[in-house]
Amino acid sequence: FLVCHALSYLVDVARGDAPAQVSPIRAALYLLCFPLLCAGPLARYQDMSPQLAQRRATLAAFAFGVRRWLVGYCKVVFLAAAVAGPADIVFATSAAELGMARAWLGAVCFTLQIYFDLSGYADMGIGFGRMFGFRFVENFRAPYLADSLTDFWKRWNMTLLDWCRSYLRLALTSAAGGGLVRARQASLLFLCVGFWHGPGWNVLVWGGVHGAIVALEQVWLAKRLATMPAVVRHAYVLLVVLLLWVVFRAESFPGASVVLVAMAGLGGAANGADAVALTLTPWFWTMLTLGVLSISPLWQGGGRWLVTVDALTTSVLILISTSFVYLWRRFVDAARFLIGG
């Protein structure tokens, strides 16, 4: 993020899109803006320059920032953490022990985990910014509700693709050139997106396959998708994204193949009770339900009533998380006493 901000500053000043900072403190404030350095969103210098010179920190903005930070905190600490455990167990399971149900469980859990993690940190960054009078652009917009892979990438990590468009001249969609030109741009764009997420070959392949499918949509598939029912389009996006998250999450290609083969029902283990035991816990289902609600259009739409709902939800989550271990230990002690008696 620091390198991207530095490049944004140099390019925007060189192009004349924003003035150079005379004050080294303001320049450092942009480069080292702590709410953004953890996981974004990426902020272009031309968007931040006016706010460095003049911004208003009001009580209403501070209250909104606190609420947004709390929403992000709950996504990371409660929702992402709740589904991370099953995902970690599944991706660490050997081929001989991994059944179909458990493989799908791990893939779905990681699909939710990475969204809650990244969007949660983005929410926390946006919330911190509002507390201090900054307005950062949104980074996620209900991506799992997309009806094409192109639409998915217009909703997922939006500031990253905007940065690539502004400074690498690589656009997700473009009116210029024919279908092959747009397909080539999409392929190059997603190779860069893959490299951004890490140097591993599995991550580069993840980005390359995304680029290939987006390129196919640009050239041919988009018109076919437009004739299909909405539920089919959504199912297509979720299936492609989920399968590619398996490649992204696995530590190696053999590890990814183990999970993908098991998801196809060709694994070496029958579906046992371990998958059920892994999922059917009150805490997991509570977090999963809240997670699904958090990505729904109703929750995304906003409204003043959400302030009360978010505050109540946060209070309940914190109460549950701090008392759950104590209550569980008391329950176990009581059960042992009754069994022993």
Image: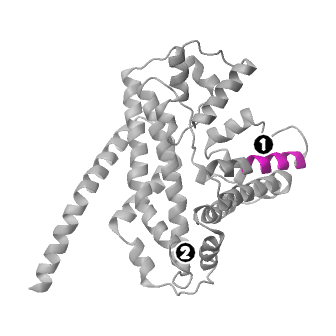
| Residue 183 x %, y % | 84, 50
- Circle on res. 173: 1
Q: For mark 2, what is the residue? A: 103
Left or right: residue 14 versus residue 60 is right
Left or right: residue 316 versus residue 143 is left
- The residue nearer to you, when weighing 232 against 257, is 257
Residue 173: image quadrant is top right
Q: How is the image coloured?
A: one colour
Residue 231 in view (yes/no): no
Cα distance between the residues tagged 1 and 2: 34 Å
| Residue 143 x %, y % | 60, 50
The residue sitting at 39% across, 64% down in the picture is 285
**Residue 184 magenta:** yes
Task: Tell me which segment is drawn in magenta.
Answer: 180-190
Amino acid bearing label 2: Ala
Does residue 277 lie above or below 246 as drawn?
below
Q: Residues within 10 Å of mark 2 (few under 14, many from 20)?
A: many
Amino acid bearing label 1: Thr
| Residue 68 x %, y % | 42, 37
Helix, strand or loop for disc 1: loop
